[in-house]
Image (cartoon, rainbow, N blue to C red):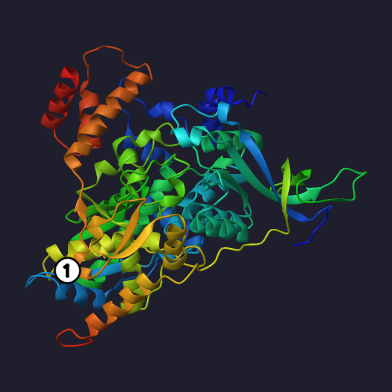
Amino acid sequence: MKSRAVEGDWVRIHSVVLKPGERAGHLPEDTKKVPLEMWNKGFLVLPEFRESAVVGDEVEVKTLTGRKISGTLVEIHPAYTHSFGSYVPEIASAGNKLVSLFRSRKGGMK
Amino acid sequence: MNTGYDALMGRKNDIMKRAVGIDYGSFEGKNISFDYEKMMMEVGYSLDEIREIQRASAVGDTPLIELKNLTALVRQFSDPGKGARIFLKDEAANPSGSFKARRAAVSVYHAKKLGYKGVMAATSGNYGAAVASQAAMHGLDCIIVQECYDSKGKGQPEIIEKARKCEAFGAEVVQLTVGPELFYIFLQLLEETGYFNASLYTPFGIAGVETLGFEISSRMRELTGKDPDMVVVTNAGGGNLTGTARGLLKAGADKTRVTGASVNLKGLHMASDRDFNRKSFTTGHTGFGIPFATLPDRSDVPRSAARPLRYMDRYVTVNQGEVFYMTEALARLEGLERGPAGNISLAAAFSLAREMGSGETIVVQETEYTGAGKHIQPQLSYARENGVAIAIGDPSEEVPGRSIIIPSSPALIKAQDLDLEDMRKSLIKNLILNSKEAGRSSQQTVRLTERDYLFLIEESKSSREFVENTVKVMESD
């Protein structure tokens, strides 16, 4: 990851929207105890005197719709890292078993 | 202006009115009732108009595929003469990869016509991608608000994929941790931006699905010479079922039975931080399906156009392991790799087809796209990382949040019926209590006008006697 973000860099920020005491009523106990948090992405907007920002800094961004919002910088050039996960032997073997079962039936493949 | 929680929630109705451009008050009756059909007619578009709007944005007219191998598989386990022919409406072929494009197409078209600069939707599901895709086509700005992470910052892979897809279409995505206050953020953003609320529950959103029911009837008549005997629809907020059923009726398919299907997530709390990552389905489950069916007006608009109990003939649940298994089966036996959440109705149909005659037909009404995060493997391995046991065995032994049981044989896939009569009673009670809460009738005894009776009969698809008995029991409680 890029270590310093400069004006206009695409970044991800984090903020706390509601502290535990400020949350809505009728919440399950576990949810009541934790804050409501938010993540946004946008282009970094720095004040004139500042050249760059690092992860952990309080910064302002301009979002894709042109809104200006602030939060803690958590990622510079945020990437998608979700994947196809780990191998799951149970589903693979269920699939193989199903195919054999189907092919062995009376009359075979249609 | 004060944007604190209570102050903002107090302005809810005004914000919503501006953001959907509908005066819901004009459809309200004096007491409990409101004029549903008038709302659908005056606010929505006709079926022909919608077909035109959707065709102009490459939505709809998706293939209807006969699943011959899955039908043969069903017959391997059915009594002689049983095992209906299974068909599948391949909704993944829509621009954003799901049937939700139908709903978004109408909402975004309408927003543009009214001169809104942008559109917004609160959704962790395929609807976000659909609104983002349509907004891109129409040149409107778009913000999608998602419930995405637990308090440790761990996000459901499926939701993260949908955020990626929304961003691929140029939408701004706002991601939140678990909690119903998502609605507060959503209102804040609506007020700040003045965008259109492309709610899933407006008449536009529901009318958009009517074409799906209509296409199913038309194509089945071409393929088999008759309407389908049953259509199975995944049920969450109720819009998919309501719209499809209305479309079937508009096509004249009034003999077709409409069955709702949801994934069984019994025991998991939808607003619980801990439970959030212990479920493998983020929509199409009972956590939405049952509460929304028994009180549709809990949605983000004053009167939801999604009212599934008006149309549902039967409501079944399937387990998570069964849906994952059918997702694998669809890929391995039919050569169609599709997303798990779209296969809820497929798992239900596979079980229901066994009870039906071999001369009958059953239509699985949707599929959805698949990809990184939104796929059997990442969803199952994520469940395992979060402490959910994955095993092969009898799926009826699955405990939501604790285990996912992949069936050891397709014969073990068994849709479970929910008690629809009980749900109809809950709906009647909720509609009456809801109107009292709104201060419209404060008597101890429930006094219903003739219009209220007719409304409750239609809402619950029941009879006068059924409504009267439910009210009697309610008064004696």
Residue at the left extreme, as displayed: B80
Q: Give me the residue at 25% from left, 41% from top.
A: B310
**Quarter holding the N terminus of chain B?**
top right
User: In which quarter of the view is residue B65 placed?
Assistant: bottom left
In percent of width and height, residue B374 lies at: 47, 63
In percent of width and height, residue A20 lies at: 57, 31
Q: Is residue B279 visible?
A: yes
* Crowd around label 1: few <14 · some 14–19 · many ≥20 (10 Å): many
Looking at the image, which is closer to me, A53 or B314? A53
The number of discs equals 1
Q: Give me the residue at 73% from left, 44% from top.
A: A72
Looking at the image, which is closer to me, B451 or B265? B265
Name which residue type carries label 1.
Ala
Looking at the image, which is closer to me, B363 or A45? A45
User: In which quarter of the view is residue B281 placed?
Assistant: bottom left
List the residue tagged with mark 1. Answer: B84
* Above/below status of B336 relative to B217: below
In percent of width and height, residue B122 lies at: 52, 44
* Above/below status of A26 relative to B386: above
**Quarter holding the C terminus of chain B?**
top left
Q: Is residue B116 visible?
A: no
